[in-house]
Image: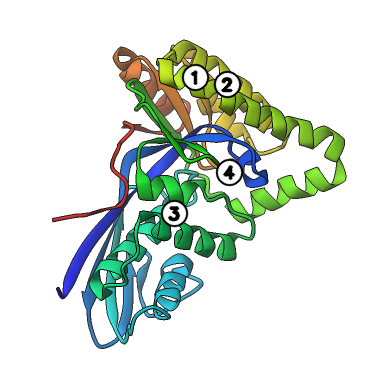
Amino acid sequence: MQTITCSAPGKIYLFGEHAVVYGESAICCAVDLRTQVRASLSDTIRISSVLGDTGLDHDRYPYVSSVIEKMSEMADIKGITLRIDSDIPVGSGLGSSAAVTIATIQALNLLFGCGLGPEDIATLGHSIERRIQGAASPTDTYVSTMGGVVIVPVKKKLNIIDCGIVIGNTGKFSSTRQLVSNVALLKKNYPQIIDPILSTIGRISITGEELVIKQEYGSIGELMNINQGLLDAIGVSSPELADLIYAARSAGAYSAKITGAGGGGCMVALTQLSGVEDVASAITRAGGEAIITRITEHGVRVEH
């Protein structure tokens, strides 16, 4: 086998971002936006995408470069050409770094016969994200590997959510590392205030588990909106996100909240299937890019 193409999905959080970094529960869903990595044996190491063509480059391609270096400890990788194409906006809170990391690991795993299973892939992906981002939850890489709807840290799969999903992209880049660092500083300075907020976000996720199982979308929405208020309290929202969130709610969405680290990037709205276009239009009018998608059971996979 000289060439292989693998893809991995992005993700949204129903509940739990930021709190999950401190061991609290979160519910995360793989969405049908994917990053594709085409790997071919070659004499040198080349990485290409819309960001440009280069060799190992920890500034332009930190995750992919780190995967190649790490997997060179498992296999004799003298040369590899990687082509990356993605539906997932970078720096948007939709798990673009996890998706490219997991897709690259699986492509090299299969091309060089490393023998890694799904749990190994997710664990290796998390270690790479943690090294690059500082503090990083294992959630993104786990969901990108496994697909579906997952509650962590117990790693239990839940029912697929069968309602409308509309993502609103502010187009404003946000640094996960910086936002996680900002929350950590707040937690250090005001532990008696921030610790209960993070704990409450975790309890929202635990309460939400039963609602996801029962497919009670109205109640899921109420909890998502409460979660959004708590994320706002720890300083990870933005005026642009707030505009899209309230536009989606006003258009009839069950809920709308930040997904991911915040600060920019994306929000997500849950809505009735019949209301998807209305919510998408409202997000567009409020200045965002609306992305209509769905939850997917498919994690990392080989593309033929």
Q: Are marks 2 and 1 in contact (CB under 8 Å)?
A: yes
Residue 161 higher or lower than 275, as above or below:
below
Residue 261, numbered label: 4
Name the residue carrying label 2: 207
Q: CA distance from mark 1 to mark 4?
A: 25 Å
Name the front one of labels 2 and 4. 2
Residue located at (47% from left, 48% from top) = 140
Residue 3 in the image: x percent, y percent? 17, 71
Identify the mark nearer the N-term, 1 or 4.
1
Rendered image quadrant of residue 253: top left
Q: Disc 1 on helix, strand or loop?
A: helix
Q: Does dot 3 land on a helix, a strand or a loop? A: helix
Q: Position of residue 274 (x, y in %)?
A: 29, 13
Using the image as rendered, state which of residue 172 and residue 6 is in the foreground: 6
Alpha carbon distance from label 2 to label 4? 22 Å
Q: Dot 2 lies on which element?
A: helix
Kind of residue at disc 3 = Ala
The label nearer to you, 3 versus 4, is 3
Q: How far is the residue under mark 1 from the one under mark 3?
A: 27 Å
Instruction: Please state which amino acid type lies under the numbered disc 1.
Output: Glu
Nearer the observer, disc 1 or disc 4? 1
Residue 215, by quadrant, is top left
